[in-house]
Image: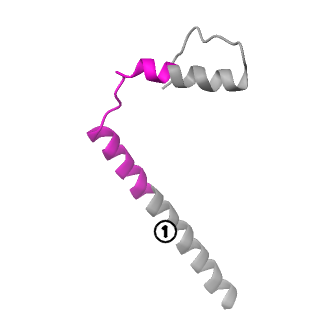
Amino acid sequence: MANLDLLIICVNAFLAVFFVLGILAAIMKLIMYIFPQKTEDEAAVLAALSAAVHSVFPGTKISNIKEQK
């Protein structure tokens, strides 16, 4: 009897986690819809990427940046 109760608790917890994650995903979609991504700051992004790459690989040059969707 105790094993069945433990199984029911585990299944309920598993379903609760999926429910909460689904709600969070919906909220994130809504936030991304309300506040779309701005692409105006390409110079700042290029500077940040160049600094990060130069700190790891000194002397490298970034020639092309592509965003994958």
Q: Which residues are magenta?
A: 22-46
Q: Position of residue 51 (x, y in %)?
A: 60, 23
Q: Please identify the dominant SS of the magenta region.
A: helix
Number of numbered discs present? Answer: 1
> Nearest the camera: 16 or 47?
47
Kind of residue at badge 1: Ala
Q: Position of residue 9 (x, y in %)?
A: 58, 79
Residue 67 can be seen in this image:
no
Q: Position of residue 62 (x, y in %)?
A: 60, 12
Query: Which residue occupies the extreme left position in the image?
Result: 34
Lateral position of residue 16 relative to residue 26, left or right: right
Query: Which residue occupies the extreme bottom position in the image?
Result: 1
Label 1 secondary element = helix
Which quarter of the picture shows residue 24? bottom left
Q: Position of residue 65 (x, y in %)?
A: 54, 15
Residue 55 can be seen in this image:
yes
In the image, residue 35 lies in the stretch drawn in magenta: yes
Q: Residue at x 35, y 52 (%)?
A: 27
Which quarter of the picture shows residue 64? top right
> Nearest the camera: 12 or 68?
68
- The residue that label 1 is drawn on is 16
Query: Dot 1, crowdedness within 10 Å: few (<14), some or many (≥20)?
Result: few
> Nearest the camera: 18 or 37?
37
In this view, 9 is above or below 14: below
In the image, residue 53 lies in the stretch drawn in magenta: no
In this view, 44 is above or below 34: above
Question: Looking at the image, what colour scheme do you see?
Answer: one colour
> Nearest the camera: 15 or 28?
28
Q: Residue at x 49, y 68 (%)?
A: 16
For the N terminus, which image quadrant?
Answer: bottom right
